[in-house]
Amino acid sequence: MNKEELERLLADKKSKDLPYNHILSSMCTYPHEVAVYAHEMFIESNLGDSGLFKGTKEMEDEVIAIIGELLGNSNAYGYISTGGTESNIQAIRAIRNRRRREGLSDMNIIVPETAHFSFDKIADILSIEVRKAKVDHQLRVDPESVKELMDERTICIVGIAGTTEFGQVDPIEALSEIAEDSGIFLHVDAAFGGFVIPFLADRDKYKFDFTLEGVSSISIDPHKMGMSTIPAGCILFRDGSYLKELAVSTPYLTIKEQYSLIGTRSGASVAATFAVLKYLGKDGLKTVVDKCMKLTELLVNGAKQMGIEPVIEPVMNVVTLRVHDVDAVVKALRAKGWEVSTTRSPKALRIVIMPHVNDDTIESFLEALNEVVS
């Protein structure tokens, strides 16, 4: 196949991918232009053998410090992962390895009912029982339910800062107290909310990071609201000894050991994350969040004018709406070119307002929604 034929083939395949313009179901978005520029510049960089790519490694170290500082601890330990799933696996794997060395077997962890499906993968991959705690009427995990599920084989409790379905923040402060009182590991899944909560107008309502003494580890995804390229997640530990629990000897590389789950690791997404954080800074990231929150308010107010109420008042840029016959509404909206999704329980229409969304998008969507529900 010659180059022209290949280009036509690729263009055909690309035409079948949906553009983000009418996607309101995804927590990913178009990467920032500086992220694309940096990604292309470091496209061949492999942090799996970081001694060969010292400049890329320097960027990763600085990114860890920047994100750590954003989350209340500039001295946190970690690395840039492929995303929230790998980060969650690694956090639980670290404490599993620690407790296994101490002689514990048949271990369990406790997560909210609203936890991401990556914890179902964790149950399978790490052979750990995953117990699911109940949530309250605001869809936040119930700390009393967590305590009821704990026993002598519980190695970790998990709180979510920005649930995938509802954008809700669990009472991490209460979970931190439980973790401190019981001497147990607390992991916070902030894959989505980590780049949102610090920039909310009412951010002080949502304590979720390393400023809480009980928080042991945090996952956060730069490729979501951080506007980096895919794949770019991040796992951070308060105590560097937990990172050491993940170490595997790599005798034939330029480094002595790896901590990551994967071997070959993209330096391009690290460079992209570095570029966005250095270019936008906190002020720029806050501007992105402010825009998304204003559009979230515009959507909710427009829905209420149609008599459609949200399941909960949005904490962040995730909206869930109570509509009659959700599946039929989703089907009708898709027929009009809109990609939306649904939640599990309670079942509702789910919309995520990412940086690619603008005023015109919301107005057009509300028109389509009004036609469908009418």
Image: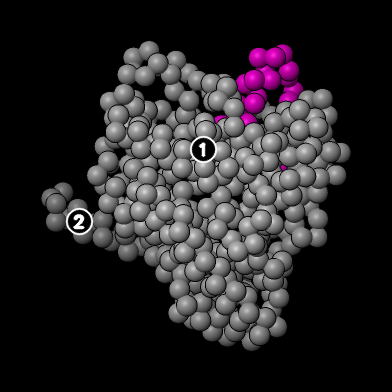
In front: label 1 or label 2 = 1
**Residue indicated by mark 1:** 74
Q: Which contiguous range is marked in magenta?
A: 89-115
Residue 288, position as x, y percentages in the image: 47, 63
Colour scheme shown: one colour
Q: Is residue 106 left or right of residue 365?
A: right
Q: Is residue 98 left or right of residue 173?
A: left
Amino acid of disc 1 = Ser
Amino acid of disc 2 = Glu
130 in the magenta segment: no
Work out how far the residue at label 1 is from the one at label 2, CA to CA, in angstroms. 45 Å
Viewer-proximal residue among 118 and 163: 163
Dot 1, how many residues are within 10 Å of its Cα: few (below 14), some (14-19), or many (20+)? some
Quadrant for the C terminus, please.
bottom right
Residue positioned 52% across, 53% down in the render: 195
Q: Are marks 1 and 2 in contact (CB under 8 Å)?
A: no
Q: Which mark is residue 7?
A: 2
Which secondary structure, mark 2?
A: helix
Residue positioned 54% across, 84% down in the render: 367
Which secondary structure, mark 1?
A: loop
49 versus 191 height, above or below: above
